[in-house]
């Protein structure tokens, strides 16, 4: 193909990124196209669109034309180039292509593809004093010439003049709004030649300000020792990643910032990865306070245009540091000097849908080796994979056992709900213990966080007559009752149902609300502690861009006494006045059917406990459970390593990570009998190669989502298997499957290192 035009002056990607992308496609078994799609902001991807122009020198006066043809030629004589959408709009049809092609065939118009990127710079109009009227004399003349009753014109001109003396221009729409005058006023002044209008490209990202933290940081001895150890390791040029294991509140963030400063001093760029929900204004303020304007933020809530601007600023090195979520790893860094992955155990680093199903933490390790850049993983509760690597010496392990400011870690108590319920000492959903603690804390003017990992009012309804549980029509999952919205809702597909009373199975009006969601806790707080100011933070209350931040701000300003929330409240938040964390019911975390359930429960409960007593006030944590003897709850107060060593033998016995690698092969289909039939066909295909290492086929935890049945195989690979061979075998088998399959309609998804 000949090159028509050069789209970008500089290539969008660095050579080394292409190597990274190639590896992603190979390792995660997807196409390079899928990697590019994930890696480049949509606004940067060139798209081609159809353009229409009138044929040169066309004399169409005497031609036989249909109404539509006439309309278009007439429009083109005013606007010489039109695009597909404009023609569709003009003709009021969806697809103007066939008619356009026939016009092209008749020699009336020419059609061509124009490649363009969607990114649009943002412009704003400004008003300024005309050069000719800058002298005092001319200005007086201008004011004198205004009509006596033209006060609006006078006001606007006054404003523009006074800003002119400050060396500033005036943002048009904002100022007109402020002075409460219409745009015709500005127009009149422009017409008289007193003022001029200009369009200026605006930096979207500078609209996000930050608050300066001025508190001086004093490191304790342990922090200084760990910092020194990390610095020496990095200076030695060893490629081993560092695992910084530090309990909650031990001040890991400040140590990252020190290392970031080191890298910047060498003129290198830095990537600081965080899970979605910990990328809060609190952390941004902290980092920006120390490092200033060279810090860019990469958040999934930014729109396409904002992403393009971040991309360009990393490329041009205006941003030297980026704090971002998992996809920030694709930004065009040059000479990376440090990658930090904070909360490295967090599952949000893994992309589930669509491909590439990468884990940004694991990419960071690979990328670090590729570009010879130090990588620091940090967590209070490392993933078993990373901790195992550290114990085996593959990573350098450094640990912080003390809190940075607080005297002690919070005191954790497990409340045995079996006894509480027998004694009938419940206050609504609160045990007498939790009730008393909340009461005391509120009386001291301190704050409470109540955690429950279910949103909605109750996770399901159940018929007391026949035991029926209303389920989603599209998915095999119970519907969650939302009291405020007065509906039942599926959390997988969004389906809503308004049948709240009558059982569809037996017809009786005996549907009972079962289980506890955050909405119910909020209601219970209002009943039991009517004086307390309570708010709820979960997916349902934080749908808008600012809602999440607004709740955090109000909590920080102590305008909220009790914050109820899902795991959104568990991470990263640092509130000095929170001295009590209550876990309303830990049991559903402990009974989740997954080999990582205990690891995840331990991590989540530790994180949420870590919100209590972060300053000098003593923190308390109360966990309500019907299973107080569960190993997770018994370990929660002890060091992480104890829990790790208790749990790891069962992983070894069962051959799960970190002792093996997993590849998950999921397949989906609308038709239950077809998917089950094809499951057997796949089994016969895979079994000869993988033997006992192949598990399945099984339905996934939720067997049907959005009307698609889902089944899966798991392949366990021992650590020393050549994954290269496995990949090519698997690839061939799947290709072969589609050659022999009766239909091509099964969707097969390969997920490497699933979490
Ligand atoms: Zn919901
Ligand atoms: Zn019933
Ligand atoms: Zn559903």
Image (cartoon, rainbow, N blue to C red):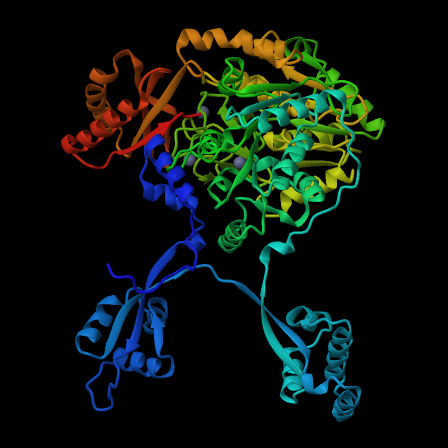
Classify 392 as above or below 176.
above
* Occupied quadrant, residue 7: bottom left
Front position in the image: 696 or 292: 292
How far across and down, in percent of the image, does residue 447 sit? 77, 30
Classify 159 as above or below 635.
below
* Occupied quadrant, residue 722: top left
Query: Relative to residue 219, is residue 572 drawn left or right?
Result: left
Quarter of image, ligand 2? top left
Residue at image position (62%, 9%) is 634
Query: Relative to residue 541, is residue 405 drawn left or right?
Result: right
How far across and down, in percent of the image, does residue 445 sit? 84, 30
Front position in the image: 484 or 309: 309
- In the displayed orientation, state which residue is furthest to the right: 444
| Quarter occupied by the C terminus | top left
How far across and down, in percent of the image, does residue 390 sit? 53, 17
Whether residue 627 can be seen here: no
Front position in the image: 543 or 367: 367
Classify 306 as above or below 664.
below
How far across and down, in percent of the image, does residue 395 sit? 52, 20
| Quarter occupied by the N terminus | bottom left
């Amino acid at each position: 193909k000949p090159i028509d035009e050069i789209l970008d002056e500089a290539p969008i990607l660095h050579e080394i990124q292409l190597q990274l992308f190639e590896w992603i496609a190979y390792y995660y078994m997807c196409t390079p196209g899928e990697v590019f799609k994930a890696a480049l902001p949509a606004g940067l991807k060139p798209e081609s669109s159809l353009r229409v122009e009138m044929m040169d020198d066309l004399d169409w006066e005497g031609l036989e034309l249909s109404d539509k043809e006439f309309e278009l030629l007439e429009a083109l004589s005013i606007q010489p180039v039109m695009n597909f959408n404009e023609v569709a709009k003009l003709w009021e049809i969806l697809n103007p292509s066939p008619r356009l092609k026939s016009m092209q065939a008749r020699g009336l118009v020419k059609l061509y593809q124009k490649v363009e990127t969607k990114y649009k710079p943002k412009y704003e109009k400004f008003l300024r004093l005309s050069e000719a009227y800058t002298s005092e004399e001319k200005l007086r003349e201008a004011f004198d010439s205004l009509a006596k009753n033209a006060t609006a014109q006078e006001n606007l001109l006054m404003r523009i003049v006074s800003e002119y003396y400050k060396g500033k221009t005036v943002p048009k729409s904002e100022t007109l709004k402020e002075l409460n005058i219409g745009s015709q006023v500005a127009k009149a002044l422009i017409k008289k030649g007193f003022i001029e209008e200009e369009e200026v490209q605006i930096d979207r990202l500078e609209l996000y300000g930050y608050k300066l933290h001025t508190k001086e940081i004093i490191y304790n001895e342990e922090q200084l020792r760990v910092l020194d150890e990390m610095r020496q390791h990095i200076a030695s040029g060893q490629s081993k990643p560092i695992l910084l294991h530090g309990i909650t509140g031990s001040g890991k963030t400040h140590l990252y910032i020190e290392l970031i400063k080191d890298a910047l001093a060498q003129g290198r760029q830095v990537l600081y990865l965080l899970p979605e929900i910990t990328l809060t204004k609190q952390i941004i303020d902290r980092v920006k306070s120390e490092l200033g304007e060279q810090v860019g933020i990469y958040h999934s809530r930014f729109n396409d245009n904002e992403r393009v601007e971040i991309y360009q600023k990393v490329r041009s090195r205006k941003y030297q540091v980026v704090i971002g979520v998992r996809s920030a790893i694709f930004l065009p860094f040059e000479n990376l000097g440090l990658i930090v992955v904070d909360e490295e155990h967090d599952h949000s680093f893994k992309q589930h849908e669509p491909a590439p199903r990468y884990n940004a933490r694991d990419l960071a390790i690979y990328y670090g080796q590729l570009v010879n850049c130090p990588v620091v993983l940090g967590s209070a509760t490392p993933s078993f994979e990373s901790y195992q690597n550290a114990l085996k010496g593959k990573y350098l392990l450094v640990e912080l056992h003390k809190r940075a400011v607080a005297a002690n870690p919070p005191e954790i108590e497990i409340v045995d709900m079996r006894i509480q319920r027998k004694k009938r000492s419940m206050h609504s959903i609160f045990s007498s213990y939790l009730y008393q603690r909340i009461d005391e804390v509120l009386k001291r003017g301190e704050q409470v966080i109540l955690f429950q990992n279910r949103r909605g009012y109750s996770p399901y309804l159940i018929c007391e007559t026949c035991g029926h549980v209303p389920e989603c029509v599209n998915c095999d999952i119970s519907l969650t009752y939302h009291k405020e919205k007065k509906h039942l809702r599926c959390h997988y597909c969004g389906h809503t149902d308004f049948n709240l009373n009558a059982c569809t199975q037996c017809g009786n009006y005996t549907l009972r609300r079962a289980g506890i969601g955050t909405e119910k806790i909020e209601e219970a707080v209002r009943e039991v502690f009517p004086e307390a100011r309570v708010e709820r933070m979960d997916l349902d209350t934080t749908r808008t861009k600012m809602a999440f931040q607004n709740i955090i701000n109000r909590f920080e300003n102590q305008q909220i006494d009790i914050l109820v929330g899902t795991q959104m409240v568990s991470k990263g938040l640092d509130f000095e006045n929170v001295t009590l964390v209550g876990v309303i019911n830990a049991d559903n975390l402990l009974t989740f059917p997954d080999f990582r359930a205990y690891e995840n429960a331990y991590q989540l409960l530790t994180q949420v406990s870590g919100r209590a007593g972060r300053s000098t006030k003593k923190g308390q944590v109360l966990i309500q459970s019907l299973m107080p003897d569960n190993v997770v709850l018994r370990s929660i107060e002890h060091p992480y390593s104890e829990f790790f060593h208790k749990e790891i033998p069962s992983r070894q016995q069962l051959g799960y990570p970190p002792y093996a690698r997993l590849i998950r092969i999921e397949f989906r289909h609308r038709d239950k009998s077809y998917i089950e039939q094809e499951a057997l066909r796949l089994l016969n295909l895979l079994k000869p190669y993988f033997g006992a290492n192949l598990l399945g086929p099984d339905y996934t935890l939720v067997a049907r989502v959005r009307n698609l049945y889902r089944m899966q195989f798991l392949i366990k690979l021992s650590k020393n298997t050549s994954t290269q061979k496995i990949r090519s075998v698997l690839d061939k088998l799947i290709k072969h499957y589609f050659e022999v399959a009766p239909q091509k309609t099964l969707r097969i998804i390969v997920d490497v290192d699933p979490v």
